[in-house]
Amino acid sequence: MFRKLLSFDETKQLLEQSFSSVPVGEERVSISDVHDRVLAQDVVSPMDIPPFSRSTVDGYAVKAADTFGASEDKAINLRFCGHVAIGEAPAVTVKEGSATEIVTGAPLPDGADAVVMVEYTSRQGNNVFVRRPVARNTNIMTKGSDIHKGETVLKKGRFLGSREIGALAAIGLTQVVVYKRPKVAVLSTGGEVVEPGKTLPPGKIYDINAHTLSAAVLECGGEAINLGIVPDEKDKMKSALELALVSADVILTSGGVSVGPKDFTPQVVDSLGKPGVIISGVAMKPGKPLTIAVVNGKLIFSLPGNPTSSLFMFIVFVRPIIMKLAGRPEESMPKVKAVAAQKMFSARGRRTFTMVNLTYNKDGTLMVSPVPTGLSGAITTMTKADGFVEISEKQQFVDAGTEIDVYLFKKLKKP
């Protein structure tokens, strides 16, 4: 039996008081492996970008003052003095009255302070005719104009995606310091579950939770360690949990937390160390049997065996913890307002989270309806739901026509 059902708010508060969710550590990682990681230190550029002034067009590098007065009717005649190729240091100097042929991306030669686009020039032998004037720095990307040496390019706490990794490569870095991924051990319990791919005997079901939870861990920045299925035997469960405590920062179990004869996960968890179980049952639906323990400074979440309840408890309670351990900023779920298409009831005295679907009516009003209750024990309840609504334990129902917040699992499609 549950020791005491805590309210949803009491559970959140006690969890926050009992465990300090700080990043588990830092490590230096190659930029080829840092996608979706989080910077643990500011990145300061060791160089100017670009490292030299360069042309942004094909044309002629010139002294801008030499082009003043040029027009289609009256071209300025400059002396051709050579070429500048991309990827090579210029071997020429632009002196007064001269012009050097240059291509896009090539370094600007000494003496030049502008580039005339090739469309506004013509060349005859050693004569370059310019038919449009340019001002200083026209068609030039000057040294350090993108990034200055000593400039903070990316700040601590920044997610590293394709754009950020490109900036790291631009300043010549091969490694950066990022937050470590917290290791999360995932164990399934129960004599009825079988690993997918194996023969399914009568009365057995495939293990859903280990795979949904492992994927959920990856999605919020953790590293999942799937320790497989543990039999409903106290000694074997204790040994598996002791191994998990050594190898992981957080432990997730599923199943064995209700009131059946083999639901002894809370007792085994409580025997592992102090303070042990701190939460044994929450006044909410789904997820009433949720058990949370702290053992040797590590959290153990014992989630319900029901796949929908297990994954939902992960979203509500576990995900925020793992994100903080991974150095990620806390994210609130996106939400929209919708009108209840039908009456939705709460579980008496419990915070109720109802999986829902969203549709638009003929007037373009966003309507919300509960996922059919016949699917409550199936993983498809989550896959078919667009989100969920939260009904207070003090509220008996949400009446049809009432506007309510809907927390979204996925991006809402507009009609």
Image (cartoon, grey):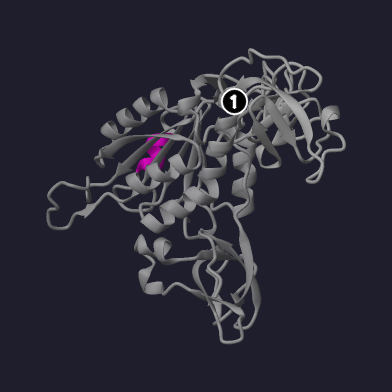
Using the image, determine if residue 156 lies above or below residue 364: above
Q: Is residue 135 visible?
A: yes
- Where residue 381 sits: x, y (%)? 40, 65
Tell me the quadrant of the picture where the C terminus can be found: bottom right
- The answer to which of 161 and 123 lies nearer the viewer is 123
**Quadrant position of residue 338:** bottom right
Magenta span: helix, strand or loop, mainly?
helix
- The answer to which of 4 and 307 lies nearer the viewer is 307
Q: Is residue 78 left or right of residue 173?
A: right
**Quadrant position of residue 224:** top left
Q: Which residue is mark 1?
A: 170
- The answer to which of 367 and 201 lies nearer the viewer is 367
Range of residues picked out in magenta: 264-269
Which amino acid type is marked by label 1? Answer: Ala
Q: Is residue 161 visible?
A: no
* Point 28% across, 38% down: residue: 228
Which residue is farthest front?
A: 125
Q: Few, some or many C-alpha atoms within 10 Å of disc 1 (few <14, some 14-19, many ≥20)? A: some
Q: Is residue 113 magenta?
A: no
Using the image, determine if residue 19 lies above or below residue 149: below
- The answer to which of 28 and 10 lies nearer the viewer is 28
- Where residue 126 sits: x, y (%)? 67, 24
Q: Is residue 329 left or right of residue 235?
A: right
Using the image, determine if residue 4 lies above or below residue 81: below
Using the image, determine if residue 369 lies above or below residue 124: below
- Where residue 109 sits: x, y (%)? 70, 18
Which residue is farthest top?
A: 91
- Where residue 299 sits: x, y (%)? 50, 34
Q: Is residue 265 magenta?
A: yes
* Point 12% across, 57% down: residue: 202
Question: Secondary structure under badge 1?
Answer: helix
